[in-house]
Image (cartoon, rainbow, N blue to C red):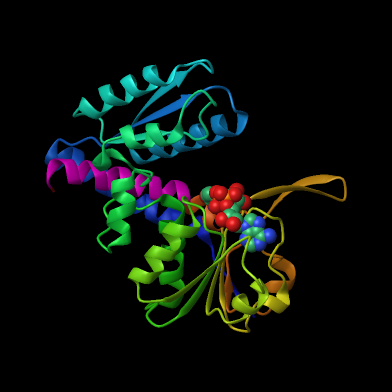
Amino acid sequence: MSEVIDGKKFADNLCAELKVEVAQLIANENLLPCIAVVLVGDDPASHVYVKNKVLRCTQLGIKSIEHRLPMETEQAELLALIETLNQDDSVHGILVQLPVPKQIDDKAVLAAISPTKDVDGFHIQNVGALAVGEPIMVPCTPLGSLMLLQDTLGDLSGKHAVIVGRSNIVGKPMALLLLQHHCTVTVVHSRTKDIEEHCRRADILVAAVGIPKFIKADWVKSGAVVIDVGINRIQEEGKSRLVGDVDFETVAPRAAAITPVPGGVGPMTIACLMYNTVAAAKLQRGL
Ligand code: NAD
């Protein structure tokens, strides 16, 4: 029987610990962790993400400030807001919900956020820090995936990790994190030949592709630990439902442990955003 990794439970436990820590920071240090969330435009999915992030902040006692800007906002206006937030000592984290409308260059936006307030971990300085093995702010989804792997396997040293996908927000930072934890890392992507052969060698298989049920049972070594980052909405038997990048039903019996979708990596992403916000507040206070 394979273990279904309960990401929701792990995320709830992490948030419970953070709630205690936030209360202590307020009581002992007069420090109220605060995140500013900036949303430009009216993308429905982005609105849902922001709502969920703000809700988690409220549950943990973290202050959140929402800035909702219209679709036609100019880049200069957004950069000016980011600079104001950079200068505001009461704001510890700044998150600009992506994607931004097409008149705005997302690279310029990410570069404008102060690296110590970059709770998404996307600033090039934080990417570089992770690359040299001295992480400061680590992107939330890979960080959450790492926590689940460590909880499941303990020491990751010497494991062969295969990551499917090389995006800047998941695949690449995941590879760097696992290297830092002494895994042997293979990254495969859309131009890789014989993907299944690489996957079959994985002790740890991380799927971040964005294709429903992409990873099949015979790609997975018996006893591997499988982390499914994918979130894909599909229509099945007339019903809409979320599935991952892994064909869960057939892969689960082969795996030693596997994350479900939903309820696996997804809840960890928001929990790690809270984790990074508390870490940013402490960092800026020198704690
Ligand atoms: P992306 O589109 O930026 O990157 C996808 C990667 O998959 C690319 O590097 C590409 O090379 C690779 N790829 C595409 N087709 C492939 C193929 N046929 N064979 C091998 N590799 C292929 O996507 P992303 O932002 O990294 O997200 C990946 C998935 O993870 C999506 O389903 C997304 O919704 C999900 N996601 C989930 C969370 C979460 O909180 N759980 C967070 C971010 C992304």
Residue sitting at x 46%, y 20%: 68
Name the image quarter holding residue 183.
Answer: bottom left
Residue sitting at x 71%, y 65%: 247
Say whether residue 130 is magenta. Answer: no
Pick whichever, 70 or 188, lies toward us: 188
- Of all residues, the one furthest to the right in this rendering is 237
Residue sitting at x 38%, y 17%: 77
Pick whichever, 261 or 201, lies toward us: 201
The x and y percentages for residue 122 are: 38, 45
Q: Main secondary structure of the magenta part?
A: helix
Q: Is residue 52 left or right of residue 76?
A: right
Q: Is residue 256 left or right of residue 97?
A: right
Name the image quarter holding residue 108.
Answer: top left
Say whether residue 274 is magenta. Answer: yes
Name the image quarter holding residue 89.
Answer: top left
Residue 93 visible at all: yes
- The magenta segment is 269-286
Q: Is residue 5 left or right of residue 115?
A: right
The x and y percentages for residue 85 are: 27, 26
